[in-house]
Image: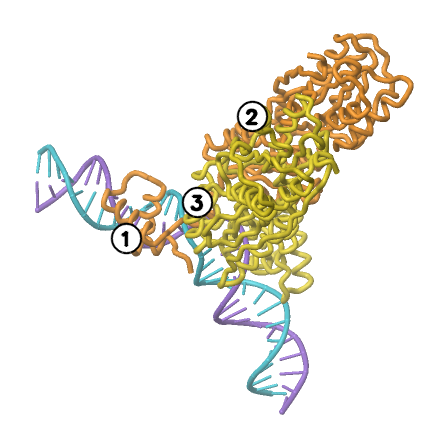
Chain colours: A yellow, B orange, C purple, D cyan
DNA sequence: ACGTGTTTTGTAAACGATTTAACGATCGAG
DNA sequence: CTCGATCGTTAAATCGTTTACAAAACACGT
């Protein structure tokens, strides 16, 4: 059917071993042989079957990035970082989506178990810590953006507790005391951490925690709108709102805009992630910025190191975040 | 090193053929053998090496989606459609990004040439029509969202000419005569087509084409802002603006908002794509909606059909679009 | 006991590459 | 002139599966 290394060997009048050596730029091969092989390759339009090659070498030089969906443009920079690191080591990055289904996530990890990729990075896993820990014992798995409590897996993320604390501290230092929190009911560790940070900031300043200022919704913008409406329609209105994602913050601001609230004066808004729209939406949103590119780069670098070593690094790396101050905090 | 089918065979006291038969749920194998194999598999923690399997069967049941970057959340629905179709036929979808580099796009297609995937779908290719046509002669390639002039490749997209015409006709029917166009300098076929549609609509209504109403920029929101500023600061101001993407339209509206223009009355705005932010941004954006999910689904269905047939379908399928009317056209 | 037909099993040959071991040729040194 | 080292090359083993083919086991009617 299709042209194999044998056909090339025949056409070049050498053995398959010689063809292989030429293709892999090994030494010990005469100039004439090199030319003959290259000509044969070109004239036959040969390209090597990697299934055969990978089987023999038992490595594919491919890494799988498993994400929930491509919807969050937020992942984009992380993936770029991953690709940068991968490329510099001669690896490719493939992406697959779990559609928020743990079973499908497991199915995708099957590519790892069945040797179709050399390693996998989970960005926002749906599987539980124990399952992942066990799988990571025998396969090269890492996590990025999210950490999991008690998970024995190489992880690269930021300190979400501190980030939440920093954001809320900033609002407090701006003289605000009644700070609303809009978060999610279904909790990822990062949203839990951010809420913990929120509480710590209040505590540091002796502000009592008030559950009427906290709204639990979903990750959608609409949920932010609802949350803002709920918080604003009660007696004890907040004078600032911290949303655990920019999307939620933008939804919340939509409500504020529609009711004539002066954003940045009457009520301050703080988001999280610094997505593209955070500085397109008017008024521009103050937010916490994660080093996305660096996280992606680091996790792949460490993962590849692990693939070479037999004493795998299971550390938790936390990269520094920063506050981006824009109009919604009056800056 | 790792456990193979041979180890399982030994542990279960049967031949490798029997193990293979059990694993592939073939008939003609006794219940005792099935049990013995399953137990061995479980106790050894065996999972089959797909490199061996794929090599033997010379198929991987994987399809590669090649996109420019994961930034455009726009692709998300298309990919979901692709996955839906793929899954129902027992295929997986992998995603890889070209980073707008034709060389890298070719490198990724290498996965197809080297039999690491069975087919590839290009979403917004950087390679030229002739190159793609040639490659498609010997490999299973399809295109989605974008078409290429004179490209002999299975393609699923919408009729961008008609879509552009429909959008502009709508503005004209709202009584507008000076309709601005904000498009891009670096042209994809779809943006060319949309501009053609713009001209056709003007012509149909006897409105002369006025090049001072057309701005050529980039795909960024900022470019929309600049474009709007340019169009609005001249003498012959437009009374409506058609942007070839929502992102550009939102950027354009940012300028309008900052200068107190009454969007939806003084100036109407029409976007393209119906991205998530089109109905989050205030005022809500009127736009052209593509059947993203369906395009993804169809292209994979047709591609898989092609993989089974030896007379590959190279048709151009154009799915119907629709106009979404919101506040920016006064609806 | 024997042939016949039906399951169930095992053996061995692929699949397409890399790599090891072995070979003959060439060359320099003693 | 011979021996050992070096170089270019080849034949064959190997990677982990699937599967065509053959053999074995079993059931059954005669």
Judging from the image, mark 2 belongs to the subunit labelled: A
- Mark 2 to mark 3: distance in Å? 33 Å
Residue denoted by label 3: A128
Q: Is residue A23 above or below residue B115?
A: below
Using the rendered image of the protein, determine whether residue B147 is visible from the camera's viewpoint.
Answer: yes
Secondary structure beneath dot 1 equals: helix
Secondary structure beneath dot 2 equals: helix
In the displayed structure, does residue B170 sit left or right of residue A203? right
Q: Position of residue B11 (x, y in %)?
A: 29, 55
Q: Position of residue B113 (x, y in %)?
A: 59, 43
In the displayed structure, does residue A325 sit left or right of residue D29? right
Judging from the image, mark 3 belongs to the subunit labelled: A
Secondary structure beneath dot 3 equals: loop
Q: In terms of image quadrants, where is residue A123?
A: top right
Residue denoted by label 2: A230
Residue denoted by label 1: B12
Residue closest to the eye, B67 or A317: A317
Q: Position of residue A113 (x, y in %)?
A: 45, 49
Residue closest to the eye, C2 or A259: A259
Q: Residue at x 34, y 54 (%)?
A: B44
Q: Is residue A273 above or below residue A26?
A: above
Sequence-first disc among 2 and 3 = 3
- Mark 1 to mark 3: distance in Å? 32 Å
Residue closest to the eye, B281 or C10: B281
Discs 1, 2: same chain: no
Q: Is residue A75 above or below residue B241?
A: below
């Amino acid at each position: 059917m299709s042209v194999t290394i044998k056909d090339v060997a025949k056409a070049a009048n050498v053995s398959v071993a010689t063809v292989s050596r030429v293709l892999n730029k090994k030494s010990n091969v005469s100039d004439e042989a090199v030319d003959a092989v290259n000509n044969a390759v070109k004239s036959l339009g040969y390209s090597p079957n990697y299934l055969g090659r990978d089987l023999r070498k038992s490595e594919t030089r491919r890494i799988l990035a498993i994400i929930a969906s491509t919807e969050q443009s937020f992942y984009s920079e992380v993936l770029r970082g991953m690709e940068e690191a991968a490329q510099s080591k001669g690896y490719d990055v493939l992406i697959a989506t779990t559609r928020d289904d743990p079973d499908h996530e497991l199915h995708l990890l099957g590519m790892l178990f069945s040797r179709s990729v050399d390693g996998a990075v989970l960005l926002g896993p749906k599987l539980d810590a124990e399952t992942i820990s066990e799988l990571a014992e025998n396969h090269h798995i890492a996590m990025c953006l999210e950490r999991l409590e008690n998970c024995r897996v190489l992880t690269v993320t930021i300190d979400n507790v501190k980030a939440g604390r920093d954001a809320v501290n900033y609002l407090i230092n701006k003289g605000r005391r009644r700070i609303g929190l809009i978060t999610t009911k279904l909790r990822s560790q990062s949203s839990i951490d951010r809420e913990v940070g929120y509480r710590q900031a209040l505590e540091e300043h002796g502000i009592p925690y008030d559950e009427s200022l906290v709204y639990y919704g979903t990750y959608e913008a609409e949920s932010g709108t609802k949350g803002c409406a709920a918080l604003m329609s009660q007696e004890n209105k907040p004078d600032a709102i911290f949303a655990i994602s920019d999307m939620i913050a933008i939804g919340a601001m939509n409500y504020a805009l529609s009711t004539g609230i002066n954003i940045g004066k009457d009520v301050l808004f703080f988001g999280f992630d610094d997505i593209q729209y955070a500085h397109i939406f008017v008024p521009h949103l103050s937010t916490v910025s994660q080093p996305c590119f660096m996280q992606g780069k680091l996790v792949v670098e460490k993962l590849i190191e692990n693939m070479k070593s037999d004493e795998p690094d299971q550390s938790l790396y936390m990269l520094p975040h920063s506050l981006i101050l824009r109009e919604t905090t009056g800056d």
